[in-house]
């Protein structure tokens, strides 16, 4: 029999020490969001193939794992594929499949909400933790199955949604990193409406926005001068580009501290009413809730890739790391696209795998672990795989005596576990030194060898 | 765009109240096994198709969901399938796939152990919780994606493995059911070696065992007389059948209370040495660890379906329910079949979905839930989606004043969350009555309407 010992390409097995860390982080996330009234939901890892190939997932749709039809449906699909020799392999693959593994948690959330909205409260505050799958080229830190952790509020059109999301997420990250001594988070808050108004104010037309934003999004890599050059290289007029770049110079000089006056100097004439007020309320209310060592700032350079965002967008960065560890925003039109009836929505996605990687690199140790004790029971001389503690009794029983066994070691272990300790009972091995070292590595501090005459 | 709102056929979405129950049960399982030194592991939901079609999974292999190859590999496979018109659809499906969704957690565990054994302690005590997938005909209580919860000890040939597994599993079930007032568990412990020896002693030949055990396994439905009839109908001699059935009459009459003498009266001459001692040690040591209201008994009628069991087998039943809620046994030869090197192994699988269904039917309520408070903030009259708490400030700011906002309601909420309470802040809706009812249904007991002049 052919048997492959490694996991499927690009996928991971988690060792016990990995799992302790992962469960620890998930525990903080669950506890924190629960206090904000978020409730956990779960959706299947498989979705109808129609839902995953509707062009809502952008590039991710090219990376889906398709699941084959079965039985008569497969037979029919095979007939079709065999019958049309010019059907391209991608189309043939879709024909042969009836479902696929989800590439994110947003599509399943929209399907879930549209299916169950009558059973759910409004606003609906959802926490979803689950595996997603992408047939990406495997590379360091990128896997084909990984855990996403999404928090969404559906049905609240007010900035209260943003405030609760930012406060809860900052709180969770603060708790996760505090114990490894890492602080220095910055919550960057932008708004698609301000982004668009600034582009409009500089003279760009609506069709040019996407192109302009893609270039602006590179600012942290190429700097503002780089952005200017690239905009010029793309053929935009020097006048427009300089006006646009000028807005961001104001930001770099610190003028965005007061949102209302920054908007006043950049795009007041073209922006819809209320945007500055929203932003200020988010900043001040979130400030009232989050730890002082977290910086909150209005960041007009924030773009975020997904085209479905309609208002506020946010991202949380961590000092000394070049990537963000959480991001999200408001997407008021997306639920409607899926379920036919608009519902305002706002969400945050926590970069769970990134966080776990950082903590692992920082040599995170489990501080919650209580006392761990091991009993190594000597099996030598004990009859027939029966431990020596029971050996004498077994021998006497074999001679016809009625013997009541006192399973001391197990009784002791049971009592200690009841007190909250972690206790293992194992046969003492020939290489006791190695056995003890292994246990010590796993955090066992109290290791006892038990012989027939040991008094417990 | 075609969009399907229901989950994929046979799969489930979990509502928030379902998840609270599921996470609660998983929490008890995790905590209990941790105290016994079991460590959690995780494997991908996808496995190499070769590993899932090696005839180790029996009937389950017919139910696998196959995942398609991609890119050039898919193209090549399509070429093959198109080129051989007589390739049956099942074979074509396998040709087009490179992986599949796992149908249980045992195959992944064996693969995991063979891949990582040098990084794992011996004995290795593993807890694995994960989704498995079977393309079964959907029916009440049977789903195509469901959670399994397996606990295994690899590398301990002694009965300590059985004792720890039985004690931990009984303990977990006791904790899970105690709060709904359900007790009355019975741990049935049998042994494949005794089962075989009894059949041999009655005169059956080795090739007949499987047939005999399949009939014996129906005893709880058809009774011992039914078993007798069916054995006779299958052509076995009355002499053999009556001798065999006689053994079980002894058991029904209560003679199995003393394992050694039961074996003495049934199969002492053909059984390997030490089996009775093993069984007695398991019974007495487990008794020392588990709660008094759990019955522990030697049950020679226990069969358990999977052919890979080699020694002890066990099952836990619950009074007034016709199905078992946990089962397992020793499978010393299986790891070797997968990884080429034998390793003794013993495991328990908890019927997680069954347990959740029972608790739900018993109207389980979350007793861990702390105080839950809701602030419903009146948005009327507040400028431009800014809540009234901030409304005045926004208006004044619009007039050019510098105003420091005191986000009272959020500050108050933050302080209460820090004390451990669950607090939500929401806009007050027009239909406040319905909003409040919905919150009360979700367990919010303290619901406050906040107006501009509310003193918090």
Image (cartoon, coloured by chain):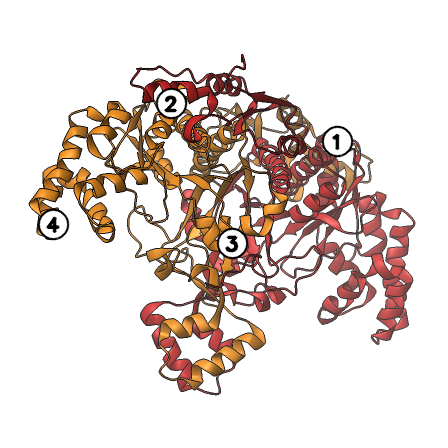
Chain colours: A orange, B red
If you read the primary sequence from the N terminus, does the residue marked by circle 3 or circle 2 appear first? 2
Residue A226 showing in the rendered view: no
Q: Nearer the viewer, residue A260 or A67?
A: A260
Q: Chain of mark 2?
A: A
Q: In the drawing, what numbered circle is on residue A178?
A: 2
Q: Is residue B351 above or below residue B390?
A: below
Horizontal side of A410 relative to A328 (left or right) equals: right
Please tell me whether mark 1 or mark 4 is closer to you in this view. 4
Q: Does mark 2 fall on the same chain as mark 3?
A: yes
Q: Are marks 1 and 4 in contact (CB under 8 Å)?
A: no
Q: In the drawing, what numbered circle is on residue A236?
A: 4
Q: Residue B77: x and y, percent?
A: 38, 76
Residue at image coords 78%, 60%: B217
Mark 1, residue position: B291
Element marked by disc 4: loop
Q: Does mark 2 fall on the same chain as mark 4?
A: yes
Please tell me whether mark 3 or mark 4 is closer to you in this view. 4
Residue at image coords 26%, 23%: A258
Please tell me whether mark 3 or mark 1 is closer to you in this view. 3
Badge 1 density bin: few <14, some 14–19, many ≥20, Cα 10 Å: few
Q: Are marks 2 and 1 in contact (CB under 8 Å)?
A: no
Q: Nearer the viewer, residue A112 or A397?
A: A112
Q: Quadrant of residue B428?
A: top right
């Amino acid at each position: 029999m052919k048997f492959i010992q490694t996991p499927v390409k690009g996928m991971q097995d988690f060792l016990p020490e990995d799992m302790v860390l992962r469960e620890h982080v998930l525990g903080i996330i669950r506890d924190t969001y629960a206090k904000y009234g978020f409730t956990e939901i779960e959706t299947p890892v498989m979705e109808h193939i129609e839902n995953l190939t509707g062009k809502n997932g952008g590039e991710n749709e090219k990376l889906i794992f398709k699941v084959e039809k079965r039985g008569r449906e497969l037979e029919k699909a095979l007939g079709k594929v065999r019958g049309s020799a010019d059907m391209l392999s991608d189309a043939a693959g879709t024909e042969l499949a009836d479902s696929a593994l989800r590439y994110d948690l947003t599509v399943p959330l929209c399907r879930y909400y549209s299916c169950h909205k009558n059973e759910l409260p409004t606003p609906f505050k959802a926490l979803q933790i689950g595996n997603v799958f992408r047939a990406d080229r495997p590379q360091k830190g990128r896997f084909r199955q990984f855990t996403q952790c999404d928090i969404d509020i559906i049905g609240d059109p007010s900035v209260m949604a943003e405030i609760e999301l930012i406060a809860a997420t900052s709180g969770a990250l603060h708790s996760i990193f505090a114990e490894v001594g890492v602080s220095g988070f910055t919550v960057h808050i932008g708004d698609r409406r301000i982004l668009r108004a600034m582009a409009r104010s500089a003279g760009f037309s609506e069709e040019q926005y996407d192109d302009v934003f893609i270039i602006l999004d590179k600012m942290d890599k190429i700097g503002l001068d780089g952005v200017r050059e690239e905009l010029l290289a793309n053929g935009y007029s020097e006048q427009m580009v300089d006006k646009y770049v000028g807005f961001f110079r104001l930001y770099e000089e610190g003028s965005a501290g007061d949102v209302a006056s920054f908007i006043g100097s950049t795009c007041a004439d073209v922006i819809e009413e209320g945007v500055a007020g929203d932003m200020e309320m988010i900043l001040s209310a979130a400030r009232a809730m989050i730890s002082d060592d977290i910086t909150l700032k209005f960041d007009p350079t924030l773009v975020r890739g997904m085209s479905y965002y309609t208002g506020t967008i946010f991202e949380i960065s961590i000092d000394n790391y070049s990537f963000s560890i959480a991001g999200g925003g408001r997407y008021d039109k997306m639920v409607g696209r899926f379920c036919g009836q608009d519902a305002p929505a706002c969400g945050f996605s926590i970069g769970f795998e990134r966080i776990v990687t950082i903590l692992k690199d920082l040599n995170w140790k489990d501080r919650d672990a209580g006392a761990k004790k091991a009993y190594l029971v000597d099996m030598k001389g004990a009859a027939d795989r029966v431990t020596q503690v029971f050996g004498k009794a077994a021998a006497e029983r074999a001679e016809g005596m009625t013997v009541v066994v006192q399973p001391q070691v197990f009784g002791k272990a049971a009592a200690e576990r009841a007190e909250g300790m972690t206790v293992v009972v194992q046969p003492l091995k020939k290489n006791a030194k190695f056995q003890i070292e292994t246990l010590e590595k796993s955090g066992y501090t109290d290791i006892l060898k038990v012989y027939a005459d040991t008094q417990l």
